[in-house]
Image (spheres, helix red, strand yellow):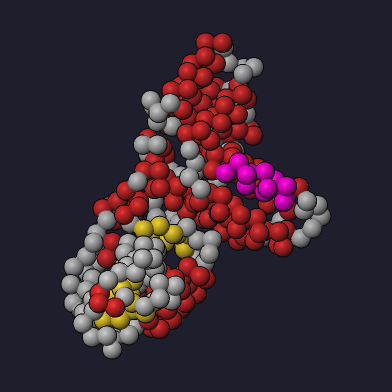
Amino acid sequence: MPDITVPQSKPKIAISACLMGAEVRYNGGHKESRLCSRVLSEHFDFVAVCPEVAIGLGTPREPIRLVGDPQQPQAVGTVDRALDVTQPLADYGTRMAAELGDICGYILMQKSPSCGMERVKVYQDKGRPAEHSGRGIYAQAFCAKHPNLPVEEDGRLNDPVLRENFLTRVFAYSAWQELLKQGLTRRGLMEFHSRYKYLLMAHSPVHYKSLGHLLGSMGKGDPALIGPQYFSELMSALKICATRGTHTNVLQHLSGYFKQTISADDRQEMQQLIGQYRHGIIPLVVPLTLLKHHLRQHPDPYVAQQVYLQPHPENLSLRNAI
């Protein structure tokens, strides 16, 4: 099996408290996500946050909504416009960004005027929504302090491709934090990149090349200077969803390591499954399982270290649906 470094403890993910079943919504209810509360909670330590309750709004309470300029909206009461909680929400976002420095991801409540990541309605005069949507006040302030943090909305996690992408980024973020704890060295940075090469190739061939050039130009330079730029570009790359085409390219590269060691029939079977995957007939897990089988039979240290083979726990079954 791949020799992939696994964090010593569960990665921490912050989450809107209502998604964990807490009855903190304006109407006294919740919006429990069973994916989060029952499935993902086995693999992550969730930190539940409700900014509206945290700044002193009661439960139940008058709902708030965004109004004004979509670029800089205000969060006010839907009945009492004098209830303006814009600054308290923004301040709380900045405060929590400092307090939650050890999280590796954030799952936000969609369309919320406080927590919505995008597509939050911003109302104009006479109650009509603006043409352009906004972001929740708290979410905007928090994310501004953590631009590389994997962030996703609960509704989008129902899409298997977006779910797999988000959790891939969470584990990559966690692995980078572990590397920083050990102290960033030139060797450590090069080894980290070596492990992530094929995952990068699957998500963004352009970043795969540019990050290779970045490290190639490092020479004897200080890794502490290049490290932040490297990590920022890595997370930008992983945010791009891998496609059947890019996955196929990586599968072809990895299968090439076994062309001298497996039989002609095995090579043909491998190519057949890669072709079926490319055409949408079978999920990614099928050719990957065969690839891992050949890796066990014919160990290759370079291939075995590739995070691409197992970027997240196998029992999450994330690649069974893509």
Q: Residue furthest bottom?
A: 82
Between 190 and 283, the one nearer to me in the picture: 283
Vertical position of residue 321 compared to residue 111: above or below: above
The answer to whether 134 is drawn above or below residue 318 in the figure is below
Residue 144, horizontal then vertical, whole percent? 51, 70
205 magenta-colored:
yes
- Asked if residue 9 shows in the view, the reply is no
Magenta segment includes 69 = no
Residue toward you, 8 or 96: 96
Q: In this view, does 293 lie to the left or right of 303?
A: left
When the figure is inspected, residue 182 is found, relative to residue 250, above or below; the finding is below
At horizontal 60% and vertical 33% (from top left) the residue drawn is 303
Residue 25 visible in the shown view: yes
Q: Residue at x 52, y 67 (%)?
A: 146
Q: Where is residue 259 in the image (x, y as percent from the top left)?
A: 62, 18
Measured as percent of width and height from the top left, residue 248 is found at: 52, 30
Magenta stretch: dominant secondary structure: helix
Q: Quadrant of residue 26?
A: bottom left
Residue lying at the far right in this picture: please name it: 220
How far across and down, in percent of the image, does residue 155 sit? 31, 54
Instruction: Please report the residue visible at 54 percent of the width from the left and 61 percent of the height from the top.
Output: 148
- The residue drawn where x is 48% and y is 38% is 243
Query: Does residue 186 appear left or right of residue 158 in this picture?
Result: right
Q: Give the range drawn in magenta.
A: 204-215
Quarter of image, res 254: top right
Location of the C terminus (image quadrant): top left
Please state which of residues 56 and 99 is positioned toward the viewer in this rendering: 56
